[in-house]
Image (cartoon, rainbow, N blue to C red):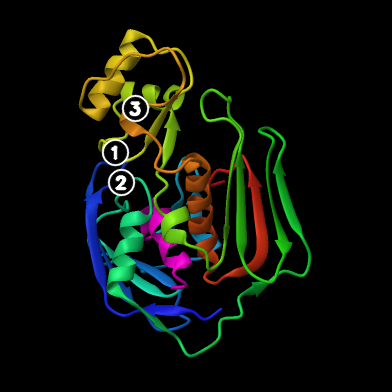
Amino acid sequence: MTPNTLHTAFSLSGHGIHTGLLCSVHVHPADAGSGYTFVRTDLPDAEPLRLSPAVVTDTDRRTTLSNGSTTVHTAEHLLSALYASAVFDAHIELTSGEVPILDGSALPWWEAIQTAGLVPIARLEHGITLRRPIRVEDPETGAWAEAIPAAYPSFEVELSHEAEAIGPVKATYTWGQDYGGLVAPARTFTLASHITPLIHRGLLKGAQPGSGVVVIDYALDDSDWKALEDFVGQPLERREDKGALPLTSYRLANEPASHKLLDLMGDIALLGQPVRAHIRTFKPGHK
């Protein structure tokens, strides 16, 4: 597995989905072996944030990274696209603390990376090799994850929801496959039962129409429909069945699982190099 570096820098701007704050992101090539480093340009005295699993401070609906001086929220979509591009070193400047949600997927980041161009690095990247399988479980939710030694990195995600809403659905990806077609387009998704309370509370200030998939998983009352209409900015046809709203229909048949796989790769990117393992998860989250 030969790593790449960016040929040129690139920039994207947008609003953070949780804070609603505008953020401009400037991604620059970095020296081989330097890893991913975040710099908050709005905090000139803050210490640069060198990424590793040790800087994860919160995993509630997003991954929060902090060294106590610099904090960055929701970086997993950008990191997933860099990781899939075999770019393991980048200097990333932010004008605020939350990476923009953009369209809710990694596709804008992926396309920007491809436009910037990739240059192979001479040194061979061996990656992390597992000596034995690893498995962790959450007895409260039934979720689990395991990593099995393999020749190349590969990922498998399985979700478990009501069949009429999302249903049991899987996504798989093997290193070198078409990330831009199979994974990058998958947008973040949420169940109506999760998002309507947040809307009623005035949260998700940076969400924009089309920046995710809303899935109806229970019978909505009129106040919930009105909340969703205010949220997406247009009238919605009332319906009694469950599934993806027509406004936010799926780009991929297995989009929810593919997005969870996208997030998984973004979180694994914190290791800074590929893992020679088949990583499987059931009912995954950032935790």
Q: Is residue 179 above or below residue 280?
A: below
The magenta segment is 69-87
The tag earlier along the polypeptide, 1 or 3, is: 1
Please check the rendered image and state whether residue 247 is part of the magenta-colored stretch, yes or no. Answer: no
Q: Do the residues labelled 3 and 2 touch (CB within 8 Å)?
A: no
Q: In which quarter of the image is residue 121?
A: bottom left
Reading the image, the residue beneath label 1 is: 210
Residue type indicated by callout 1: Gly
Specify few, some or many for label 3: CA neighbours under 10 Å numbering under 14, 14-19, or 20 or more. Answer: few
Q: Is residue 270 left or right of residue 145?
A: left
Q: Is residue 277 visible?
A: yes
Reading the image, the residue beneath label 3 is: 246
Relative image position of residue 236 (x, y in whole percent): 27, 20
Residue type indicated by callout 3: Pro
Q: Quadrant of residue 41?
A: bottom left
Q: In this view, does 67 lie to the left or right of 29?
A: right
Residue 103 tag number: 2
